[in-house]
Amino acid sequence: MHRRKSLELIAGFSPFLLLSSNPVASKNLDSYQWLKNFKVRWNNSQTYCFEIFDAMPSSDFNYRPNPEIMSYAKLFSHIGSGLNVYAEVLDGSVSDNEPEPNNKTAVSDYLNYAFAHFNKALDEINIDDLYNIKHAKSDVEPWKGFSIFDIITLGYNHTIHHIAQATVFLRLKNIVPPKYRF
């Protein structure tokens, strides 16, 4: 990646770092604008997730580089499971159970469901509470002390982390991953 593009990405991500480490600065950023910007990036991440998911042929869907690592299929059902947990923390809803990651269609359906569940929770956020600890699991460990902002960024980071793992799996199978979206 070019140095300039790297710096642009760091600068684009800096509000996450700034807000998570500086509560005074977090109150000065317009919450509406932050959430609007986040949703653009989040939608791109969702599209990218499915592009990566679809890049692996069904015949290699259960590929794993070694026994200690989740399979390609499990990475995506795990992404879905994580999104459902974060949505539940935000809105108190109950989600579908994670499917066995042995069927590409079932995992795709579950991942679609999980993104829709998380997106619905995002849409229902009271923007005035973004930096407050007012969510459905405020009194439950390990979520005590986490703001809504923290939960959103945890969901983002968890998803991107596993998408990055999946791109390595593709490379190990000599498949060029789709171009990254930001």
Image (cartoon, rainbow, N blue to C red):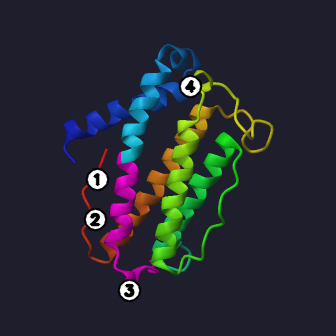
Of the 4 image quadrants, the one containing the C terminus is: top left
According to the picture, the residue beneath numbered tag 3 turns out to be: 59
Helix, strand or loop at mark 3: helix
Q: Position of residue 137 (x, y in %)?
A: 75, 41
Q: Residues within 10 Å of mark 1 (few under 14, many from 20)?
A: few
According to the picture, the residue beneath numbered tag 2 turns out to be: 177
Could you tell me which residue is drawn at 57 percent across and 32 percent down? 149
| In this picture, residue 109 sits left or right of residue 136 | left
The answer for how far apart the CA atoms under marks 2 and 4 are is 36 Å
Helix, strand or loop at mark 2: loop
147 or 104, nearer to the observer: 104
Image height of 128 relative to 181, above or below: above
Image height of 91 relative to 109, above or below: above
Image height of 29 relative to 36, above or below: above
| In this picture, residue 7 sits left or right of residue 156 | left
Residue 73: give its label: none
The answer for how far apart the CA atoms under marks 3 and 2 are is 17 Å
**What's drawn in magenta, residue-wise?**
44-65
Q: Are marks 2 and 4 in contact (CB under 8 Å)?
A: no
Could you tell me which residue is drawn at 33 percent across and 74 percent down? 172
Going by the numbered disc 4, the residue's amino acid type is: Ile
According to the picture, the residue beneath numbered tag 4 turns out to be: 127
The answer for how far apart the CA atoms under marks 1 and 2 are is 8 Å
Going by the numbered disc 1, the residue's amino acid type is: Tyr
According to the picture, the residue beneath numbered tag 1 turns out to be: 180
